[in-house]
Amino acid sequence: MQTGSGRSAEDWYAVLEALQEGDSLALAKLTRLVNSFLARWNAYDFRSDWDDLLQEVIIASAVALREGRIRDRRAVVGYLRSTARFKFVDRLRVHMRAKEDQTLPWEDVVGRDELSTANTMAPEGLSQDVRGALERLSENRRVAVLGVYLEGKTYNAVAEETGIPLGSLKRYLREGIAQLREELGDFLDSG
């Protein structure tokens, strides 16, 4: 097969078929292709996950071919690219959630077991110092912190209920948590 530039283009459908027959050269070719996608997306921060991403994409593509979900020979590169993109975005989301899943100031004061009962009581179940710090937050920050962390609602649910755009809600949440940490630092240290 020739491309417009005169170079021969790879038949990726045939490469996937060869992979299913155990061809290690096919695996190397697919790895190189998926690596190029990840490199174009600057996925270098996920080097520790890179091999897992490669494996997931290649396995998903091989399974899709075996199950007949890739019918058009020309669709293989698009399928690989889309699958790699979705798997990469999934990894990004996991890493973002891990950053957001940090210890919160009142968890040090109230404790995780007590927090579950505090969730139903909102700020009243918290100490006076924590309640005061929450009251000093701006309205948007307070709504974000109370909705997500004390009431246990999802970001989307709080955004929908308040009309605050999701990105802004996350910013208010980060800022609110930072302010609470700053205000409660001495209180937490006295412990």
Image (cartoon, grey):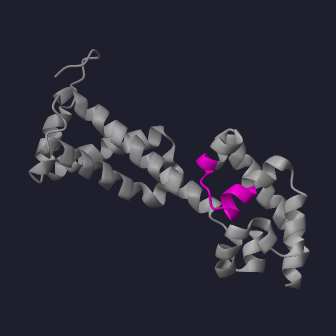
Q: Residue 112: percent from the left, percent from the top?
A: 66, 78
Q: Residue 58 in the image: x percent, y percent?
A: 27, 49
Q: Main secondary structure of the magenta part?
A: helix
In the picture provided, is 82 more to the left or to the right than 67?
A: right
Let me know if residue 109 is in the magenta part. no
Is residue 147 visible in the rendered image? The answer is yes
Q: Image point 84% across, 49% down: which residue?
A: 139
Q: Which residue sits furthest bottom?
A: 191
Q: On the picture, is 171 further left or further right than 13?
A: right
Residue positioned 38% across, 53% down in the render: 53
Q: Quick one: which residue is furthest to the top in this view?
A: 4
State the image coordinates of residue 91 (x, y, percent, origin top left). 47, 53
The quadrant of the image that shows the N terminus is top left
User: Residue 89 at what x, y percent from top left?
Assistant: 47, 46
Say whether residue 146 is magenta: yes
User: Which residue is at a point 80% across and 54% down the rendered structure image?
Assistant: 142
Q: Residue furthest left?
A: 21
Q: In front: 186, or 46? A: 186
Is residue 103 visible to the viewer in this orientation of the structure? Answer: no
Quarter occupied by residue 98: bottom right
Quadrant where the C terminus is found in the figure: bottom right
| Closer to the camera in the image, 24 or 16 | 16
Which region is colored magenta? 145-157
Count of labels in the image: 0
Horizontal arrangement in the rendering, residue 126 relative to residue 52 (left or right) = right
Q: Is residue 180 left or right of 40 when viewed as pictured?
A: right
Q: Is residue 161 above or below residue 72?
A: below
Residue displayed at 28% across by 33% down: 77
For this rendering, which residue is in front, 68 or 114? 114
Question: Eyeballing the image, is 178 above or below 92?
Answer: below
Nearer to me, 91 or 143: 143
